[in-house]
Image (spheres, rainbow, N blue to C red):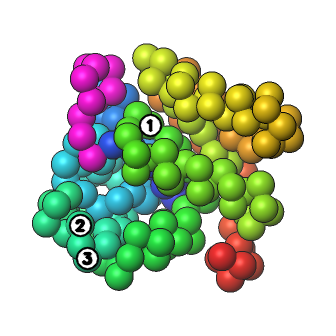
Amino acid sequence: MSVAAVAVFCGSRFGTRPAFLAAAREMGAGLGEAGMRLVYGGGDVGLMGAVADATLLAGGQVSGVIPTFLQSREVMHAGVDDLTVTDSMHSRKQLMFARADAFVVLPGGLGTFDETMEIVTWRQLKLHDKPIFIVNVAGWADAMLAMLNAAVHDGFAETSALDLFEVVPDVATVMARLTATAHLPTTEDVSRL
């Protein structure tokens, strides 16, 4: 079975480089055109909003998941097909995980780092085996990748930890990988979290 739903982690701000916004729009358009549902944080701001808008514009479906306390801060996206409000950040991430067949990390800040580290850790703990792609747009992920490599170098992680995710240079590459990746999610994945 091909990937039907993709969780995209990215910033609630636009960042400083035009390449970030361009990548977010390209990602959304790619998902919409491929018939893959976007699962994301539910906001209408920053790169999050840009991914959702581009997915909808391309005729795609969007599932947003946002915690109650961020409803006004991240301005809930009124145009998505399915918007769920959760009681906490953890339940937000858990629901996004349950709805996604694969994960794509685009440029972002602390929230994006948090989501990335948690989903990679869950894979390390064998709570899932869903693919994780880090899209290193304009080198934005270099520092995060250096930190992960340092954890291996300093003996805090096995070398195999670097195989838990795939780093790709651009959206075109991740879209090619998503369309080629087969994964059948199970309810067992969700029940172990």
Amino acid type of the residue tagged 3 in the rendering = Thr
Mark 3 lies on a secondary structure that is: helix
Amino acid type of the residue tagged 1 in the rendering = Leu
Q: Which residue is mark 3?
A: 68
Looking at the image, which residue is at 32% across and 20% down? 19
96 vs 85, left or right, is right
In the rendered image, is residue 40 in sight?
yes
Q: Which residues are magenta?
A: 12-21
Eye-nearest disc, 2 or 1: 2
In the rendering, which numbered label is found on residue 106? 1
83 vs 10, left or right, is left
Is the Cβ of the residue at disc 3 closer than 8 Å to that at disc 1?
no
50 vs 150, left or right, is left
Magenta stretch, main secondary structure, is: loop
* First-in-chain label (3 vs 1): 3
Spatial CA distance of label 2 from label 1 is 20 Å
**Up-down relation of residue 5 to residue 134 (above or below):** below
**Up-down relation of residue 18 to residue 58 (above or below):** above
**Up-down relation of residue 48 to residue 129 (above or below):** above
- Quarter of the image for residue 66 reads bottom left
Amino acid type of the residue tagged 2 in the rendering = Leu
Q: Which residue is mark 2?
A: 70
